[in-house]
Image (cartoon, grey):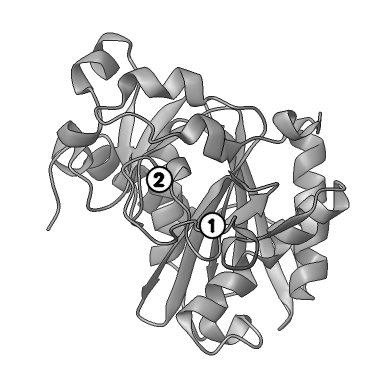
Amino acid sequence: MSFGSHNWRLIDTGPLDGAANMAVDEALLQHFDPVGSPPVLRLYGWNPPAFSLGRYQQAAEVLDLELCAERRLPVVRRITGGGVIYHAEELTYSIVCAPRHIAEAATVKESFARLCGFLLCTYGRLGLDAGFAVDHAPSGTRLGGRIPFCFAGKEEFDIIIAGRKLGGNAQRRTKGVVFQHGSIPLRSMVAVALPYLRQGGGGVEKDAVSLAELGVALGEDALKQLVAASFREAMQVELQPDGMLPAELDTARRLEEDKYRNPSWNLSALR
């Protein structure tokens, strides 16, 4: 398939388990050439539900690993930082691009804001008054503090609706490539996640929100279509549906077996 300068690959892998999802994300990152590759927007889900740890989190300090094992709840480690996330009843996205694909974004913060712009557009189309935490967080809110549970903290460019955080996003840069992924919660799963957390949710029940709690009853397929349309509008690009290339698939399979199903990566502390 031929891609023009304003065309992005749209890859919908559907729901995968935690190890496969993280392997696909990293495979897309590894195979991206900042000079010649078309940028990527990937959409996916999680089946079964899973926890993902931030790259540098201490697994045993954050999660009750015995309870996770007892209830067969997978735990994987992301290549991005941030707090632990419980993935269920959500639409997840990932983006792989070069800085040149992000117009009017000279700094890391500007690129983060730019790449999260399609989320604001998505929520606006749903009739929600959404904004970045740096502009819309309630007075006195602490931004940027390290919180074990992702949805309990607020970064400058987290999405805020009625004072509450909707989803979470994380970015990583390597060798001229920008990688970002994040989640859009359809329904709140906070109550399900809390028993597994070592340090509690830090008031996340009041601070986080889902689309269902905001009165939005939207199926995953409809949300995917809305996200794609919003991405086109916000980024001023075209999306061309595409599948993973054979080399990307081979790398994803290798990463899945050698890394993301390996306790030495998922549970051991990284430095």
Q: Is residue 131 visible?
A: yes
Q: Which residue is mark 1?
A: 245
Mark 2 = which residue?
A: 22
x and y, in percent, of residue 126 in the image: 85, 46
Tag 2: residue type?
Met
Which residue occupies 26% across, 34% down?
261
Check disc 1 and report its element: helix, strand or loop.
Answer: loop
Q: Dividing the picture into quarters, in which one does residue 211 lie? A: top right
Q: Nearer the viewer, residue 67 or 50?
A: 67
Residue at mark 1 to residue at mark 2: CA–CA distance: 17 Å
- Horizontal side of 211 relative to 100 (left or right) equals right
Question: In the rendered view of the protein, which quadrant contains the C terminus?
Answer: bottom left
* Residue 69 position (above or below residue 124): above
- Estimate the x, y position of residue 264 in percent, counting from the top left: 13, 40
Q: Residue furthest front?
A: 140
From the top left corner, tell me how far across and down residue 32 is, in percent: 47, 71
Horizontally, residue 15 falls left or right of residue 71, namely right
